[in-house]
Structure formats: structure tokens, C-alpha cells
Image (tube, helix red, strand yellow):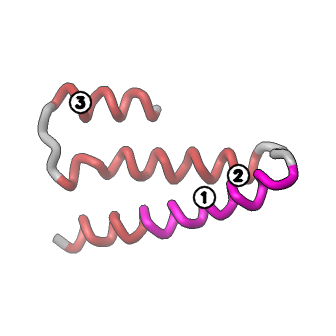
Amino acid sequence: MLVVNIAILVTEGDYGYDKYMSLVVTLMLLFNHVAYQYKLPGSFRPLAKLLAWTWLSIGLSYIGTVVLR
């Protein structure tokens, strides 16, 4: 899904702010899936969860900004 989103973004050539919506949502899903579905070794588990929550907040802020424009 991530590769397809990047390929579509690159082939279209239009890099407007609204074109990144599917990429942001895909990364939100990917980071949350990795953080909460896999058994990661000791110190990677809290880092993965921190990354997932951070990207979730960034992604929701981005989506809110795009929707309000």
C-alpha cells in the first residue's frame, strides 16, 4: 500500500498538499500495526509505540489542516 501511494504520487507529478493524504494515512496504519501487533525486543517496543503515537498526532493534525482549507 505504501509503495503504491508513493508510485502514484511520483507519477502524477502534482505535489499539492492534498495529494499526501493517502500517504499520511498509510504511514499511520503501518506504524500502529508494527507497534501493537508484533512482539518487538525490549527497548524497541516503547520506541515503536512512541513513534506510532507521534505519527498519529502529526497525521491527525495534517488531516485536520487539509480538511479545513
Determine whether the residue tagged by mark 1 lies in a helix, strand or loop.
helix
Is 33 rendered above or below residue 10? below
In the image, is 18 to the left or to the right of 23? left
* Amino acid carrying mark 1 in the image: Ala
Q: What residue sits 35% from the left and 46% below the top? A: 22
Residue 33 as seen in the image, left or right of residue 60: right
In the rendered structure, does residue 10 fall within the stretch colored magenta? Answer: no
Label 2 sits on a secondary structure element that is helix
Disc 3 from disc 2: Cα separation? 28 Å
Q: Is residue 55 placed above or below 7 in the rendered structure?
A: below
Instruction: Give the residue drawn at x 27%, y 71%.
Output: 65
Assess whether mark 1 and mark 2 are in contact (beta carbons under 8 angstroms).
yes
Q: Name the residue under label 2.
A: 35
Residue for badge 1:
52
Q: Where is residue 61 in the image (x, y as percent from the top left)?
A: 38, 71
Q: What element carries label 3?
A: helix
Q: How far apart are marks 2 and 1 (CA)?
A: 7 Å
By secondary structure, the bulk of the magenta-drawn segment is best described as helix
